[in-house]
Image (cartoon, coloured by chain):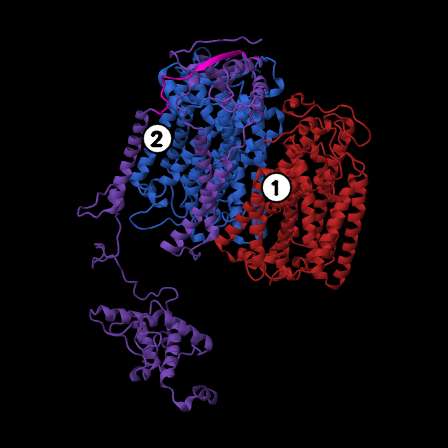
Chain colours: A purple, B red, C blue
Amino acid sequence: MSEMHHEKPESQEDAPLFGLLAEYNTPGELLLASQKVRDAGFTRWDTFTPFPVHGMDRAMGIKMTRLPWLVLGAAFTGLILATWFQWWTNAVDYPWIVSGKPFWSLPANIPIMFEVTVLFAGITAMVGMLVMNGLPQPAHPLDLKRRFARATDDKFFLLVEARDPRFDEVSTRSLLEKSHPAALEDVPEDRTTSAQIPTGLIYGLIVLTAVAVVPFALFAKARTTKSQNTRIHAIADMDSQPKFKTQRENLIFADGRSMREPVAGTVAQGQLRDDDALYLGKVNGAWARTFPSQVTPTAELMDRGEQRFGIYCAPCHGQSGEGDGMVHLRASKLGQGWVPPSNIHQQYIREQPVGQLFNTITHGIRSMPGYGPQISAEDRWAIILYLRALEKSRAANLGELTAEQRQNLK
Amino acid sequence: MADSNSRNKKSKSQYPTKGSGHGTSSWGDVIRNSSDTHRLFVFAGGIGGVALLLSIALGMGDFKRFQYSYLVAFMWALSISLGGLWWVTLQHLVNAKWSIVVRRVGELIAANLGLLAILSLPIVVPAVLGNSDLYMWVDSHRMQENHVLHHKSAYLNVPFFAIRVVLYFGFWFLLSQHLLKSSLKQDGEKADTQTVRLRRLAGPAMMGVAVTLTFAAIDFMMSLNPIWFSTIFGVYYLAGCVLAIHAFLALSLLWLQKRGALVKTVSQEHFHDIGKMMFAFTIFWAYIAFSQFMLIWYANIPEETHWYLLRAENGWLKVTWFQLIGHFILPFAFLLSRHMKRSRTALALGALWVLFVHYVDMYWLVMPTAFVEGPELHILDLTCWVGLTGIFVAAVAYRARGVNLVAVGDPRLETSLAFENV
Amino acid sequence: MATLWSDTNPYLGAPKGDTDFARITDNVARVAEAAKPPIGWYIAFGLALTMLTGFGASLAWVSWTGIGAWGNMHPVAWGFPIVNFVFWVGIGHAGTLISAILFLLRQTWRTAINRFAEAMTIFAVICAGVFPGVHIGRPWMPYYMFPIPNQMNMWPQFRSPLEWDIFAVGTYFTISLLFWFMGMIPDFATLRDRATTTPRRLIYGIVAMGWRGSSRQWHRYERAYLLLAALATPLVLSVHSVVSFDFATSQAPGWHTTIFPPYFVAGAIFGGFAMVVTLAVPARQFFGLKRLIEIRHLELMNKVILATGMMVGYAYGMEFFIAWYSGNPYEVFVFVNRAFGPYAWAYWTMIACNVVIPQLHWFHKVRTNVWCTLAIGVVINVGMWFERFVIICTSMSRDFMPANWGYFVPSTIDYLTLGGSFGLFFTLFLLFCRFLPMVAIAEVKGAHRDAHAGHGGHHHSHAPETA
């Protein structure tokens, strides 16, 4: 059945033998031939098929590739990187609260951890396969054999390289002939084609990549540099929107303002403050001397007052109320003209009616801003309760202590 | 029609075509086992029976605890057979060829659904008789407590529940029996009539399995906390069922092989495939569990989060972490390797672990309802589980005596015998 | 009409070759090698290009004028663009399922359609990716979505499902592209070795990367293919799950429900397969691929369509039941509203297209009929678009506060954008059909019965089956 074809080297003179190429019509024949070559102890040989032939790995003695381990390593790398990156960006570098979720929200980070793991693993599988296969492989001596073109069509080939230590032109040829190939040819080395990727192509790719990066680089530069020139408004009606902003002019109204007062006589929902004692600290027009009826001094209210004091008052007035808070310390250091916050233990403050204290907290006094908008009325009273306790802590008489407390002093 | 192209996958020598005696197949393998299965039946049945009686006795003293422990063990055992029912139906539906040699054992496992109907009585009967230890909705007065419960009582009430239970078990019993009996019948016929009929049946049957499984999970487990709800709950239970059947199937096959049956029939290739399914469904389970958790965590709506808060606080937090590590990370890493899936020992260990963490999953689903502070292990947990497992195994062993352990009449048998994995 | 194919169609007629393998090669390669495709291709391409131009024009208009050019309006803040996004991403999933999942399940019938389906995935994901890019109001600032340093020193908000989308869809596109390209390397080599002109040899040669079919290389190639398939499988499940998280992580009734992830994935596969058959029926006819893409392949795809359709139906049922069971009046209202409210016409279209009509595929006669396959495929695509419309637009149009209700009306630009996206898809797809190997030549050969060693020593020459 087999015919022996001895074709002369096609393009180069005196090229030494690269190997022997046997051609078969069916995968079964190739498998049998491969087993023979494998059993004969050859190592530098290969088969070429249009599709992966089932059983060829065993027939050729090909060991399992290490690629899966590489991919596993890449997967871990991706997983760790994604986890660390999400943690670092959202919990360390620029933490900000999003719908009450913790800075590092592991459940919310899982989808991206998974995706990046797969991304790294997949890219590694593909690129790893190409690299381990030696691709791209621009030239091979087999390219010069016209018959070999059918390796990607419907024929099956076996090549034994002359570089193999067991190679011998006569015995190897007869070994191959025993497998009844459809054709058996000499393959000379390729002396004409370069095995390198054409330098033109590489330069071209480098230039192309560089050119592709340029617009992005320009864009990044434009967005990060300061300029004295006016901005370019590409989308005019987005940058100058025809609407009335807070401080802008509005000629519809006589006073020309955009910001309007609420209509006279109207009260916003929840804003009807008709209890003077609770909301103004006044009883019959004078400062209240007692807490309003809605406010019962309890331990819980005291705790609340302490907490609110710590949030709103302590930065200036200090934890102890002496006026030595962080803001004061820093402002003093800056020395740019600073009126120190009051020491709340002073006599006149201790003697002030609670209603007046309430007014101070609400509207501010001298350099102190008003805290009415930030602190609810109930909380303001809690703070005052705590203030009184603070003051008491510095100004108590021995006679006001219980027996047990007197014992502790000793 | 036998698939004449099945020869192309074979790489082993030709199987002998002559059968040689009772219990031996035409390819020279032992495919029946009456002695070992009988012994297993007696052994497992004995231990199971004793444990179950012990459970009932202990339950007289602490009925609520008995109910909870029993429910956990019951849902675990049910998931194995339900998983079996799903699996066998699926093999018919997709015309799977690799699994022919192992399908009979799956059919035998699924056929336990009739027995499980009886074993459900310790849960169902007290509910029907008005005991609300397990299901608070049994108490129709308490269901009038608030508007939402009142609304649900149209579904969560004893008569409707009883009807549904009858429907579930009736359907499961009939389908599992039909699948097994048709397959056994085919052993004698050696024609493809049954195969064609079952493939046609498999579509509607699968729809029935999906719906009944979902609502059984809702009725038995989700309704423990009647306020809570989750549309994915049925799928979550299904994921557990699929894991359970594959693990139990692997162990059953390995046991049979150790006793000398199916040695030449069920190869490393088949175990590899069972291992692949266990691997895939470990991931699937984790995906479903995570979806349910993350969505409820993210939206943070109190009427949904309370169920997870229970499992994130006190002693249950440890168990929740165990679910992540034991139910996902460990089996994932273990079953990832091709080598592990192809090693009988490794696969057996993996299967045992999967069945164990599946039990923990059932425990985690059920117990926090009654034991808020954390898992309170009790001897009833053990006795109920031993009891139910013993009876379950005994029933499968009983059914396996005197039948072919391989569907010898299936026209696709040769392909399955010669099956080789990627 | 006769000139659209028959006489001048270089794709028809018996493929050349004296072995089945050679005939497979010729059948597919001649499509890419034809010097001029028949008129029909030009007409279709012209149409697609026109639609693409419309797409570009409408997107340019929106970028210039603003999102107001669309119908998006309070309370329906997500209108057509997001519906289109989810629609296109969903379509892409079938390709990965066919490539990766059916590969893992050893379904060799996939080899006839996987190349084509993978191409469809790539193009569908491209179409999908356009929409999040342009719907952000300032489409010249998409870089904020990516974790790159910027002049505001800000990082993306990783706790947002919209950010997860970027990673999911980006990863999906990358992996699908790699998988598709890797699959084509051996086929590029085939085209390179058959090339008669130097430009063709050069171009196919470069992309073939010097592939010569070495078994040692095949070994690593097959391992990489298996790994990519194993990675792509959970990936495809995750991508549409992440897309579903866009809705499910919210608190809106009708959106926030735990079954969304697997439900969306099943729906994606359902719609994707419908698109595959919609394309496969005319393509196999026109490009002469009936010998390779047989009726049995269409039938199997129709079965998958039926199965996933049932899963979608299950999800509809579960949503409905649990909405009632929950006792949450807002949840109950959403479903009543869908069926009987102002968008009822969309809801019932969806039910008819997704639940009712696909039931026809229970019948063998319907499954194996090309025209029914095509018609039902189109119907399902319409239904799946409407499903996203119903979920997104109707839920938002009537949510918690009646004072907040509104009726979304798409604008002309909305329709232009939707239709135009098909232009982008078909332009790319027709280019693929023209220049790239439409069927996985090497894989089809590998699945052929002659490929197996049992027939060693014999020389078979079976006549290929005619359609």
Query: Left of C312 or right of it: where is C69?
Result: left
> Percent from the top left, x then y, of residue C151?
29, 48
Residues in magenta, as a range: A180-197
* CA gap, disc 1 and disc 2: 50 Å
Chain letter for mark 1, please. B
Residue closer to the observer: C283 or A62:
A62
Q: Quadrant of the N terminus of chain B?
A: top right
> Percent from the top left, x then y, of residue A348?
29, 83
User: Residue B140 got which mark?
Assistant: none
SS for dot 2: helix
The residue at which mark 2 appears reads as C54
**Within the image, what quadrant is residue A261 found in?**
bottom left
- Chief SS of the magenta region: loop
Relative to C126, say whether A28 is above or below.
above
Q: Residue at x 37, y 46 (%)?
A: C147
Tell me the crowding category of disc 2: few under 14, some 14 to 19, or many 20 or more residues within 10 angstroms, Cα based.
many
Identify which amino acid the numbered label 2 is placed on.
Gly
Task: Report whether residue C400 is seen.
Answer: no
Is residue A190 located in the magenta-colored stretch of the structure?
yes
Q: Residue at x 65, y 57 (%)?
A: B137
Query: Left of A288 or right of it: where is B278?
Result: right
Q: Quadrant of the C terminus of chain B?
A: top right
Identify which amino acid the numbered label 1 is placed on.
Met
Task: Report whether residue A301 is seen.
Answer: yes
Outermost residue to the bottom = A399
Residue closer to the observer: A176 or A396:
A176
Relative to A306, say whether C263 is above or below.
above
Q: Residue at x 43, y 87 (%)?
A: A409
Outermost residue to the left = A228
The residue at which mark 1 appears reads as B278
